[in-house]
Amino acid sequence: MVPIYVPGRTMAIVAHPDDIEFSCAGTLARWARAGSIVSYVLCTSGEVGIDEPGMTLERAKEIREEEQKRAAEITGAKEVVFLREPDGLLQPTLELRKKLVREIRRFRPEVVVSGDPTIVWAGEDYINHPDHRAAATVALEAVFPAAGQPNLFEELKDEGLSAHKTRKVYVMSWSNAEVFVSIDETIDLKIEALRAHKSQMRDWDPEEMIRQWAREEAKGKEMAYAEGFRVVTLINNETWEKNKETWSNSAKHSQQT
Ligand SMILES: [Zn+2]
C-alpha cells in the first residue's frame, strides 16, 4: 500500500457516540496502527438515542459511553473524553468552545478531525442532525484561531495549559471530498467498531452499507475502500518542520473520562 501521511497525534471531535464509527473510524484505525496517538472527544453522550420503554437518560448515557469506549478500543484510540453536553440540544456556545480549547491545549493534536458544519441535507432522504452541525462548528472555532491564541481563555494557564496550533484539520466530507484515505486494511475494524454500538444497531448489520459507502468513495482510485475529507493545512510544511519538536512533545497525557 502507498505510504500515507500519519499525524503524530490525532483528535477527533464529534457530537455523538457512533459518529466516528459511521464516518472516519477507518482512517483513525489506520493512523493508530501506524503509530498515531488518537483521542476521541464526544460533545454529548447520545443519551436521547435509545428509544426503549423504561429507558432513562442516565442509563442510556452509561450504555452509550460504554459502547463508545469499546468502539475506541477496537480502532486503537488511546482515550475517549466525554464532555456530556445535552444530547439533541447541542449548541456551539462559547462555553463549549472553551471546553474544546482545553482539550486541544491538553492533548496537542497535530490533526483535528471534525464534521462539516455546512452540511444541512444530503441526498433526498436525510437532514443532517443539528448536533452534528453544532459540533462541527464549535470544533473548527476551537481549533482556529482560539486554541492557538495565548491571550484567549488565558485562565487555562492556571491548569498548566498553553496555546496550541493544530497543523491540519480533516473535515469529514460526504460529497465534496478532496483527499481520500484508503481504508482497505481497516474497513473490517470500522465495521466491528460500529457493531459495538449495539443499542443503535439492534438487529441491523451495518456491514453492507459501510462497504457500499466506502466503495463509492474509492471509485476511480487505486483503492477498494476509502474515506473522504476536505483538508485544511493551517501550518505550512516549512514552519511545521522547524517547530514540530516543541509543538508535539509537550502533550499532557491526562485522565480518561
Ligand atoms: Zn450523530
Image (cartoon, rainbow, N blue to C red):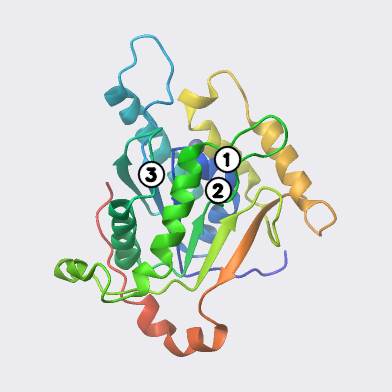
Q: Badge 1: few (under 14), some or many (20 or more) residues near its Cα, within 10 Å?
A: some
Q: Residue at x 63, y 42 (%)?
A: 188
Of 232 and 237, the residue lying toward us: 232
Instruction: Report the Cα–Cα distance between label 1 and label 2.
Output: 7 Å
Report x, y in % for residue 63. Answer: 36, 28
What amino acid is found at the position of numbered circle 2 in the picture?
Answer: Ala
Instruction: Name the residue that disc number 2 marks.
Output: 25
Please state which of the two labelled residues, at mark 3 or mark 1, is closer to the viewer.
Answer: 3
Single out the residue that lies furthest toward the right. 220
Of 55 and 188, the residue lying toward us: 55
What amino acid is found at the position of numbered circle 3 in the picture?
Answer: Gln
The label shown at residue 22 is 1
Instruction: Report the Cα–Cα distance between label 2 and label 3.
Output: 24 Å
Q: Badge 3: few (under 14), some or many (20 or more) residues near its Cα, within 10 Å?
A: many
Label 3 or label 1, whichever comes before in sequence order: 1
Left or right of residue 60: residue 25: right
Report x, y in % for residue 88. Answer: 41, 32
SS category of the residue bearing label 1: helix
Single out the residue that lies furthest toward the left. 158
Instruction: Report the Cα–Cα distance between label 3 and label 1.
Output: 22 Å
Q: Residue at x 51, y 45 (%)?
A: 20
Label 2 or label 3, whichever comes before in sequence order: 2
Left or right of residue 6: residue 145: left
What amino acid is found at the position of numbered circle 1 in the picture?
Answer: Phe
Report x, y in % for residue 49. Answer: 43, 26
Instruction: Name the residue that disc number 3 marks.
Output: 91
Q: Are marks 1 and 2 in contact (CB under 8 Å)?
A: yes
The N terminus lies in quadrant: bottom right
Q: Does the numbered disc 1 mark a residue whose Cβ is under 8 Å from ligand 1?
A: yes
SS category of the residue bearing label 2: helix
SS category of the residue bearing label 3: loop
